[in-house]
Image (cartoon, rainbow, N blue to C red):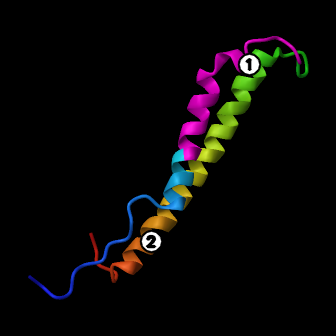
Amino acid sequence: MSEAQEVRPPVVTPVRVVIGLCLVAPFVAMLWVGSYAKTDPAFIGIPFFYWYQMLWVLISTALTMLAYKLWQRDQRARRVQDGGAAK
């Protein structure tokens, strides 16, 4: 048995929870049809049903980009903690 045991960072961290929420939020918003299955309020003549979904396309893009940037930051921090070991 070796004296120096490798200490690994926890798998579930607050950053990873935020990443998960960023990726799950668009699915929840689109699967909850009752929240947007209506025509009012209209936006520049477009019924709510359509512009809400198109708005989520933009929101999903932003959330996915945020999740990716957070993941990159998390991976860099883990490599530094591991002593810069290349994997």
Q: In the displayed image of the protein, which residue is found farthest to the left?
A: 1
User: Foreground: 1 or 45?
Assistant: 1
Q: From the viewer's perspective, tell me whether residue 77 is left or right of residue 36.
A: left
**Image height of 21 relative to 12, above or below:** above
Q: Quadrant of residue 79?
A: bottom left
User: Foreground: 49 or 54?
Assistant: 49
Q: From the viewer's perspective, tell me whether residue 86 is left or right of residue 18.
A: left
Residue 46 belongs to magenta span: no
Pointer 1: residues within 10 angstroms few (<14), some, or many (20+)? some
Q: In the displayed image of the protein, which residue is found farthest to the bottom?
A: 3
Taking the spot 38% from the left edge, 60% from the top edge, the residue there is: 11
Q: Looking at the rendered structure, which numbered label has been put on residue 48?
A: none
- The residue carrying mark 1 is 36
Pointer 2: residues within 10 angstroms few (<14), some, or many (20+)? few
Q: Quadrant of residue 22?
A: top right
Callout 2–callout 1 Cβ contact below 8 Å: no
Type of amino acid at the residue the image marks with label 1: Tyr
Q: Nearer the viewer, mark 2 or mark 1?
A: 1
Residue 26: x percent and y percent?
60, 34
Region of the chain picked out in magenta, as a range: 21-41
- The residue carrying mark 2 is 76
Q: Secondary structure at mark 2?
A: helix
